[in-house]
Image (spheres, helix red, strand yellow):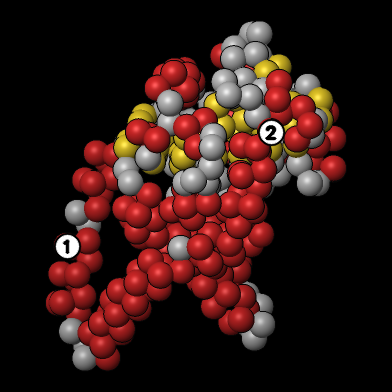
Amino acid sequence: MNNIYIIGVGLIGGSLALDIKSNYNKASVFGIDANNDHLQQAIALNIIEDEASYDDLHNADMVVLAIPVDKAVLELPKILDVISDQTLVIDVGSTKLPVCKAIEDHKRRRNFLATHPIAGTEFSGPKAAIRDLFQKKTNIICEVEKTTFKLQEKALQLFSDLGMRIRYMNPEAHDKHIAYVSHLSHISSFMLGKTVIEKEKNERDIFDMAGSGFESTVRLAKSSPEMWTPIFKQNREHVIETLEEYIANLKQFKALMEADDFDEIYNEMKNTNHIKEILKGIA
């Protein structure tokens, strides 16, 4: 793959660009972004060679769509309209069903591969891009059978070269499961941050007492609202379901506190400690 076009040169798009350039000496990576400052930063940081436009996409060997998910469903059909029949197009969004639905009847549906690399940080923009972000990270691929085999092979080779593990899943299952392990985590972090900020208005010393536990728990509250609001909107049904279960558990914990039932609180925490083994298995 010689000509790579990254649409959205932020954390994920920029990190992909850096890793592609590291692994493919002949690759030329170009950027398309609605934010011109991001394009200029990406050029200055040597993430991309130059800026481009949709008029250039007929030259692309691969196009990576790395923009907020609400914009992705609008832009993907336009991208498929102008690429060549040999071009691979992938997206990296955190919701998969809406984008798959958006192009299910497109004449170039077989040029598209729906992916979700489970990687990232709480930072955004080209300056957040880092090399080797995807090493040993899981990449979810949806509806692989709808992508032409030759382009599947091209994509899988790229993901392997970047150190990713592959998991296949249908888009409905992806969106349901990711609501629990990613979307709920971000909501919890945002709301914890909100709770503490509101309390801090009256107790100025509270942040002096904040340790590493608070910092790690609230880290995701630094994430971009521009990216996460559309994710919550697109995955609304599953996010509400996870919130109902989470709120029920919080209410149960509160009831145990009110009842002075600390034996059961101990048991709840002890049983949840099992997550250490689960996460060790993932690592």
Which of these two is toward me, 111 or 11? 111
Quarter of the image containing the N terminus?
top right
Using the rendered image of the protein, determine whether residue 214 is visible from the camera's viewpoint.
no
Q: Which mark is residue 73?
A: none
In which quadrant of the rendered view does residue 76 lie?
A: top right
Q: Secondary structure at mark 2?
A: helix
Q: As shown in the figure, which amino acid type bears the numbered disc 2?
A: Val
Q: Is residue 215 left or right of residue 13?
A: left
| Position of residue 46 measured from the top left corner of the image (x, y, whole percent) | 76, 23
Using the rendered image of the protein, determine whether residue 7 is visible from the camera's viewpoint.
yes
Quarter of the image containing the C terminus?
top left
Circle 1 residue = 271
Q: As shown in the figure, which amino acid type bears the numbered disc 1?
A: Asn
Q: Secondary structure at mark 1?
A: helix
Q: Is residue 261 left or right of residue 12?
A: left
Circle 2 residue = 82
At 65% from the left edge and 29% from the top edge, which residue is drawn?
Answer: 83
Q: Is residue 58 left or right of residue 88?
A: right
Label count reads 2
Determine crowd level at label 2: few under 14, some 14-19, many 20+ residues with C-alpha closer than 10 A: some
> Sequence order check: which comes first, mark 1 or mark 2?
2
At 35% from the left edge and 69% from the top edge, which residue is drawn?
Answer: 242
At 46% from the left edge and 69% from the top edge, which residue is drawn?
Answer: 236
Q: Is residue 210 left or right of residue 3?
A: left
